[in-house]
Image (spheres, grey):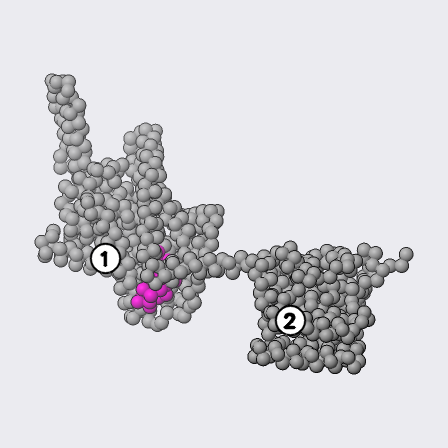
Amino acid sequence: MPKKLLRIALAGNPNSGKTTIFNNLTGTRQKVGNWPGVTVEKKEGEISRNGYDIKVIDLPGTYSLTPFSIEEIVARDFILEENPDVVIDIIDASNLERSLYLANQLRELDCKVIFALNMADLAKARGMQIDAGIMSDLLGVPVVFTVGNKGEGLKELIQTAVDLSESSSGIPEERRVRYSKDIEAAIADLKDVLIEQIDDTFPYNPRWIAIKLLEDDEIVKKRIRKKMGEPAESVIETARQLRGQLMGRFDEDPEIVMTDERYGFIAGIIREAVTNSIRRRVDISRNIDLVLTNRFLGFPIFIFFIWAMFQVTFTLGAYPMGWIDAGVGLLSSFVGGLLPAGLVRDLLVNGVIAGVGSIIIFLPNILLLFFCIALFEDTGYMSRAAFLMDKIMHLIGLHGKSFIPMLMGFGCNVPAIMATRTLESRKDRILTIMITPFMSCSARLPVYIVLAGTFFAASAGTVIFMLYVLGIVVAILTGRLFRSVLLRGFEAPFVMELPPYRMPMVKSLLIHMWDRSKMFLKKMGGIILVGSVVVWTLSTFPRDIEYSRDYGAEIGRINTVYAEKIGDAAPDRVEALKRERDELIQETKNLRSAEKARKSYIGRIGHIIEPVFEPIGIDWRGSVSLLTGFVAKEIVVSTMGVLYAVDEDDAESEALHSALKKSGMTPLSALALMLFVLLYIPCLATVAVIAQETGSIRWALFNVAYTTGVAWVMAFIVYQGGTLLGLG
Ligand code: GDP
Ligand code: MG
């Protein structure tokens, strides 16, 4: 049985992948020549598929079939005169709008046409989702997806072509491009005139000829003159008149009006069949940004988010904080019970467990804070925050972008300083690094809680909030100063990117949260451990202290006295007496630890440095706490616990409050102390990371000196000023 013959032409825009698909289909079985009479390359190849001998012709690439160029003339003539069985239009799916113009002209030509949506991979990568079903329905043309350079979809393409050649149905009438009323009327009139003059042998589609004559297509005129002879003149004359009428009505050449309308049709198709997830996301983002970066609403909303972040961090964090606290307490008494009393037990319980426990307690806060920050980052809100802060940051000569590390500084300065890596300019980076430590990190909060809680009871919250604000103000002033003295220059130009909002993925949130927290734990964990042991050692030695009183004997006396009293007392007084006794014993013990601390190495150091802190209202115990706080600011609280003569376990409880009150500290000196804690030297880990990120020890040392100087001066002003005003 002789095989049936099929001729398939590949049409398409230049670079749509025609040749790639042609090569893929035909392999080496190609003939390369020129199209007759012109120097445009013609490629033909043959394949056998599905019982057919298929001849594939690679047409020249064109954007339309309006015969302006040789390529367009060649391609159109081939389709018109050689009548291929099927034309496959290779469409660059990632560039639909441009490609569909030619596609629609092919449809108008009334040949059997298939749309191959090539570059389907690129379209997908650009976020376009093309619904081939809808497109095929709307256009009345089969649509196949292909990836030419990978050979994907080619089998289906040939199968569809074979099916189409066997079917007899053309493009349904109602699927044609509909022009506006006047143009359609002109097409209909002209078509009628034409049909009167022709018979069945007329090889072209009458509607198409009518359209082309209204467009004043010279080649078509020539063609019909050749095919029809004399009668063509009356048709062409009618076309001329109709063109005149249309021009009068539209004040524009009909071909321009029709081109416009075709593009309108294409836009409609794209709207129906293509959803662009990227563009949609951009649109949604733009709407959200109308609110979130609004000139008036943006800032209050931003402040609200920050407030909510701290709220979540500290209220939600309080629960697990309590559990961990209890857990550390349990561990401490478990280890305490396991070991005999002595130096080793003391080291483990009061040095290691208490010290490391004091940081582990903040883990929930840190995790929550970093979770919120990850949420800001992953949703894309962080860039909006930077955008909102841009104006304010320009006061310092920095960009809004520098605000991101500063914001993270509220969590922990260490990852915050690492986050300055996103800044392009080195000067901007150093400037941001220099001011970030003024952002009150979460380690400073316990100090505020204890001191503000003790001395400003009702307004503690406000005092703490003011401290945070003051940190920001000092950062801004410092920024201005450094920008005009040390790091002169202008902010590097940069584009404020506002990437589309995204729904954050829980997994990525958790990973980001953990990455930062890990950094915090690693950096701080080691240093805290060492610092705690050092503080413990300095406060435990020397062992052989000569106490001014025999505390042991006093405790013994209290016990005997109360044993007697309890024995004589009425049953309902027993409980009260026991309580009284325990309080007295505790007080005596506290006095003993206080004397021990005073005479320990740490006490001696405290007395040496006391003169430095005296002018700012801080006694030797506060001085020592500040000194140990250099290791990590959490240690300030635990050191105060040791020095103000309270059992380590109770560092944050009532006992410390009352001990502090009795210590002679006043609200004013407490404020000075908090100010100092806010502003002075960042912790050891931060100093290390400053050195690492600036690449210079000198910047790190400079930061230590500068921040401590600022802290002292500020505390001095507040304390002395307050004293002068009689607030002390
Ligand atoms: P022509 O001008 O229509 O003949 O286009 P070509 O066949 O020369 O292809 C143009 C470029 O597009 C070549 O680099 C091809 O490798 C590439 N290309 C073709 N089809 C695809 C496709 O489906 N996906 C991608 N990503 N690239 C393609
Ligand atoms: Mg090519």
Q: Nearer the viewer, residue 637 or 280?
A: 280
Q: Which residues are magenta?
A: 388-407
Q: Mark 1 Cα within 10 Å, few/some/many (few <14, many 20+)?
A: many
Residue at screen point 51% across, 60% down = 279
Report crowding for label 2: few under 14, some 14 to 19, many 20 or more residues within 10 A (C-alpha): few
What residue is rendered at 31% in x and 57% in y? 300
- Look at the picture and state if 9 lies above or below 570: below
**Residue 553 placement, left or right of 271:** left
Residue 304 image offset from top left, x and y in percent: 32, 53
Is residue 399 highlighted in magenta? yes
Helix, strand or loop status at disc 1: helix
Q: Secondary structure at mark 2?
A: helix
Pick the front one: 292 or 361:
292
Mark 1 lies on residue = 711
Above/below status of 637 relative to 146: above
Quadrant for the N terminus in the image: bottom right
Q: Nearer the viewer, residue 208 or 442?
A: 208
Residue found 34% across the figure and 46% down from its top? 313
Which residue bears the numbered disc 2? Answer: 185
Q: Locate residue 75 relative to residue 674 in the image: left or right.
A: right
Tell me the amino acid under the disc marked 1.
Answer: Ala
Indicate left or right for 493 with 55 as reference: left
- Any part of residue 253 in sight: no
- Observer-side mark, 2 or 1, equals 2
Dominant SS in magenta: helix
